[in-house]
Amino acid sequence: MGVDLEVGRNGERQPLLAGKSSKSAGSSSRGKRREKRVRGSVLYTVFCTIVVALGPITFGFSVGYSSPTQQKLTEDLGLSLSEFSMYGSLVNAGAMAGAILSGRIADRFGRKGALVIASIPHIAGWILNALAMVSSFSLSIQHHEVSFLFQNVASLYIARLLVGFGVGVISFTVPMYIAEISPKNLRGSLGAINQLSVTTGIFLSYLGGLVLPWRTLALVGVAPCSVLLVGLFFIPESPRWLAKMGIEDTLITSLQALRGKDSDISSEVSEIKDAVDISYKQEANVRMSDLCKKTIFLPLTITIGLLLLQQISGINAILFYSSAIFHSAGFSSSNLASLSLALLQVVMTGVAAVLMDRAGRRLLLMVSGAGMAVSCFLVGFAFYLQQHMDATSHFAPFVGNLALISLLVYITSFALGMGPIPWIIMSEVLPSHIKGLGGSVATLVNWTFSWLVTMSFNFLLNWSSTGSFALFAGMCAFTVLFVAVLVPETRGRTLEEIEALFQE
């Protein structure tokens, strides 16, 4: 499968790793053989989802890496608290840069091409992370040998930025690709696989941190994107992106493979092409000022609002520094407690995937926000008790257990709604003609606030542990109100029907 140079409606080339047009007999026969290898449209769509979900696995691995490695990494490299806080937060700064470019990259090179572009610097970043304090080179200048050695902090910072850049592009592209290939009755459940993979990556980083040195664990981070690069050769490009580019033959081949060779796709092809034609005319004149129009402003507000609230609820701060939180609360085995959080998040995100197309998005979001608010309040209360009792008190074990149970409830609640659904909503409600621009803005907001919360969380804990979680509880309570007032139910609707909803 090579790179096709056929020109689409905008005079742009085919996507990276794109298949040949069905005009090519050789390529057509390869497409038919590929369809025969996978029986049933659902199985093939699930297979495509699992392949791209390798990206979110490395997303989660990157988020979780700093928690189990904090102690050994700071000891080995002599990092201060502020240096490690900067290191932990730079994955968010890199992701911000990736988010800014993600929409343009995905629109220019296709969803698969964007994942290729994300994977290369991401892999390089993990390798550099593993080689921190080792990378060096020498130059001979006027018969004098001059050696250069990366400073510990500098190499770690560069590595973390590269890892983050890949994560930023992945976090936008994967949910978009999954939504665009999924049938409407499975879009919620398949979309939740994105967050399930993130939580799986977090769990693997916690588990690996218990048994592997931090350098070896960094090398493990290379694996998911490496496998993803191979897997991209065996899945089709997004039919909606192909329609947007005017590559009709490949669009039909792609959609037929996803829906099954015996399925009648004529109606869906017509819907996609009609929606894209309208969108294309609008996109030709789209400007930043157009984001304030009513038909665009509401879906964009919903998308940005949910992704903003996802971060200021404190989730990434809690995951980054979960070991430190349990230690501060007096829990004796903080690493095992953090591992319990990660495992529970995997299980409950799996439950959310099952419920997504049954209970609906709105209900799950409101239940999620309410549960997170209560649990954050209880975590803050646990810290309050810990600060006002003697260390030898027989109530000390109760405080540690209260912190653990409350955070388990928090993770359960987050995984049921605020974890997977904001990304699903982003891929569903944004009009197709501003999906690249609007999605980039929303993803940038998400990563910006993730960076701010992660960077400031250690200092917030030093200021007031109780006050920090009281702030998070307030944000979670506001989430329930935001969803009740603004977020529509998208379950069971096609992307074209959802877009029409905001035009009424």
Image: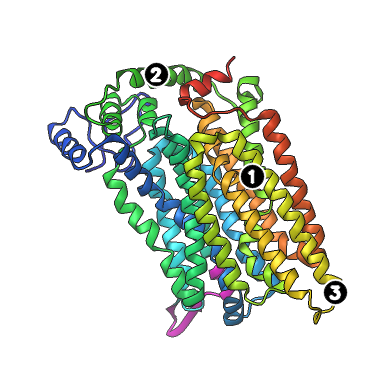
Q: Which residue is mark 2?
A: 271
Q: Which residue is located at x 51 percent, y 38 percent?
A: 356
The colour scheme is: rainbow
Q: Which residue is mark 1?
A: 368
- Mark 1 vs mark 2, foreground winner is 1
Is 303 displayed left or right of 392 in the figure?
left
Spatial separation of the CA atoms under disc 1 and disc 2: 34 Å
Which region of the structure is painted magenta?
137-156
Is any atom of residue 166 visible in this view?
A: no
Q: Which residue is located at x 49 percent, y 20 percent?
A: 497
- Look at the image and say whether residue 145 sits in the magenta stretch: yes
Q: Earlier in the sequence, mark 3 or mark 2?
A: 2
Residue 460 image offset from top left, x and y in percent: 77, 62
Residue 254 image offset from top left, x and y in percent: 29, 32
Quadrant of the rendered image containing residue 395: bottom right
- Mark 3 vs mark 2, foreground winner is 3
Q: Residues within 10 Å of mark 2 (few under 14, many from 20)?
A: some
Spatial separation of the CA atoms under disc 1 and disc 3: 32 Å
